[in-house]
């Protein structure tokens, strides 16, 4: 069973603040700038092992993506390109196979649309889909302050 973990992009400096769940004191502190972010409902996350509400921002919209290390993916491509001529381009075919294999082997992570916090080790939520740009734009714009000042519904 993988451990539960979240990675929150620090609102102060943008560094990824990684923390294993459950968190001591219900707050995570950025190692780079010292800013801390309070967590809400982290206990429920741990007991349910499903991300329903974002512990950092309270957001409820999430997408799922493969936990792909982009540097690793890029490294495979570069190595394949360097080896292409000496291996008579067999390396390129190997790289494609490796990339596809990685895609299937890598675990999925859940990411909050609103604040970008990444959740590792949780079960798949049946309503969570892949990344959707329209949803991303929608939830990013809807800051808590803007929600309170929303105009009355038309019609
Ligand atoms: Zn920071
Ligand atoms: Zn969030």
Image: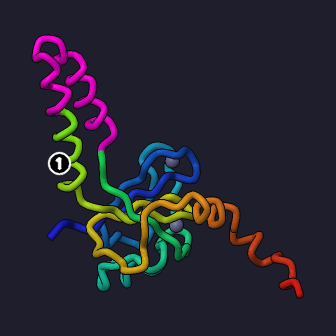
Apparent side of residue 124 relative to residue 57 in the rendered image (left or right): left
Q: Residue at x 45, y 67 (%)?
A: 27
Determine if the magenta segment contains residue 39. Answer: no
Identify which residue, 139 or 77, lies in the foreground: 77
Apparent side of residue 145 relative to residue 137 in the rendered image (left or right): right
Residue 26, placed above or below residue 90: below
Q: Residue at x 53, y 76 (%)?
A: 60
Q: Residue at x 87, y 83 (%)?
A: 154
For the rendered model, the colour scheme is rainbow
Residue extent of the magenta highlight = 69-94
Quarter of the view holding residue 105: bottom left
Identify which residue, 142 or 65, lies in the foreground: 65
Tag 1 residue: 101
Residue 73, placed above or below residue 46: above
Main SS category, magenta section: helix
Determine if the magenta segment contains residue 87. Answer: yes
Apparent side of residue 56 relative to residue 144 in the rendered image (left or right): left
Q: Residue at x 52, y 61 (%)?
A: 132
Quarter of the view holding residue 147: bottom right
């Amino acid at each position: 069973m993988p451990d539960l973990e979240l990675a929150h992009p620090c609102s102060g400096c943008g560094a990824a603040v990684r923390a294993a769940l459950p968190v001591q004191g219900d707050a995570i502190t950025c190692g780079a700038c010292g800013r801390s972010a309070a967590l809400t409902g982290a206990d429920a996350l741990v007991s349910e092992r499903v991300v329903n509400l974002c512990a950092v921002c309270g957001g409820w919209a999430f997408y799922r993506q493969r936990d792909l290390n982009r540097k690793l993916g890029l490294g495979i491509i570069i190595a394949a390109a360097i080896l292409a001529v000496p291996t008579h381009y067999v390396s390129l075919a190997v790289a494609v196979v490796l990339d596809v294999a990685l895609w299937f082997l890598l675990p999925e992570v859940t990411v909050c649309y609103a604040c970008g916090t990444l959740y590792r080790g949780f079960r798949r939520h049946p309503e969570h889909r892949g990344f959707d740009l329209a949803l991303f734009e929608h939830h990013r714009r809807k800051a808590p302050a803007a929600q309170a000042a929303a105009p009355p519904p038309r019609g």
